[in-house]
């Protein structure tokens, strides 16, 4: 699997295009403000994506859905049901930041913990990791040693929990259960900022290591 990063917008959001080589089947993950770049890449490659996978439904991770759907009508949208209220409230999310956004197309398929999304010979395992949002998921590709972790964990930080549906202790529990149990060398590709690894965050992330000889968070 080759994963291409597309970053942009006022939120500095990372969207991803995962391509299974050599057959070339692809999925779009979290199309944000840089979705037009994803479309150009796909068109040059002559590839139609087989799915839009959403780690969660905050504005910056879904604002490019219309761009993808305009270029590739009917490509199915996958979303965890616990984030459906956030998805339906996208115009309100946009208004809170002074932007206008039309209603989004209905999600086509439900993401469920433990299922595998296959494209070509590649696959993502869906791992439910709430805390940043109720229906947040991680997409883990064991065979490729990488995970698309959305806004659960970042290089040296974690997702914010002060937005509707967020909860700090739930997020910490999710990170420990769904991220830190992955092999230490697993690459973590986040929704913002640079990529990191499980071992780096387990050893150096200030939110995840013991403080002053105390217990783990």
Image: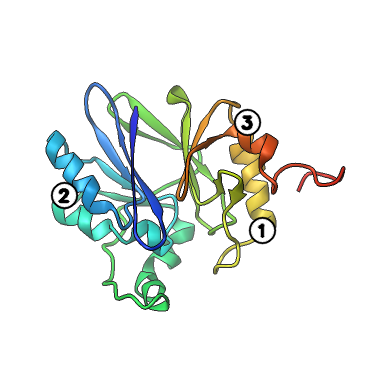
Image height of 163 relative to 76, above or below: below
Residue 72 numbered mark, or none:
2
The N terminus is located in which quarter?
top left
Q: Tag 2's secondary structure? A: loop
Q: Tag 3's secondary structure? A: helix
Q: Earlier in the sequence, mark 1 or mark 3?
A: 1
Question: Label 1: which residue?
Answer: 168
Q: In the depicted view, which residue is nearer to us: 137 or 97?
A: 97
Please rate how many residues cluster around mark 1, counting C-alpha atoms within 10 Å: few if below 14, some from 14 to 19, many from 20. some
Q: Earlier in the sequence, mark 1 or mark 2?
A: 2
Question: Label 3: which residue?
Answer: 199
Q: Tag 1's secondary structure? A: helix
Q: Position of residue 80 (x, y in %)?
A: 44, 53
Left or right: 136 with respect to 72? right
Left or right: 100 with respect to 163? left
Image height of 198 relative to 34, above or below: above
* Gap between marks 1 and 3 measured at Cα: 22 Å
Image height of 174 relative to 32, above or below: above
State which mark lies toward you, 1 or 3. 3
Q: Are marks 1 and 2 in contact (CB under 8 Å)?
A: no
């Amino acid at each position: 699997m080759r994963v291409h990063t597309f970053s942009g917008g006022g939120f500095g959001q990372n969207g991803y295009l995962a391509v299974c080589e050599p057959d070339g089947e692809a999925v779009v993950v979290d199309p944000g403000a840089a979705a037009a770049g994803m479309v150009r890449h796909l068109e040059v490659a002559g590839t139609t994506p087989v799915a839009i996978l959403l780690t969660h439904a905050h504005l910056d991770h879904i604002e490019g859905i219309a761009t993808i759907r305009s270029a590739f009508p009917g490509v199915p949208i996958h979303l965890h049901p616990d984030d459906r209220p956030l998805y339906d409230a996208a115009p309100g999310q946009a208004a809170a930041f002074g932007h206008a956004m039309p209603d989004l197309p209905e999600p086509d398929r439900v993401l469920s913990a433990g299922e595998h999304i296959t494209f070509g010979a590649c696959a993502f395992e869906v791992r439910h990791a709430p805390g940043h949002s109720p229906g947040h998921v991680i997409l883990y590709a064991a065979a490729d040693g990488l995970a698309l972790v959305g806004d659960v964990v970042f290089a040296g930080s974690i997702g914010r929990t002060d937005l509707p549906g967020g909860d700090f202790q739930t997020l910490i529990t999710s990170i420990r259960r769904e991220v830190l149990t992955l092999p230490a060398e697993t690459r973590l590709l986040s929704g913002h900022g640079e990529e990191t690894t499980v071992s780096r965050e387990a050893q150096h992330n200030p939110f995840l290591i013991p403080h002053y000889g105390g217990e783990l968070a």
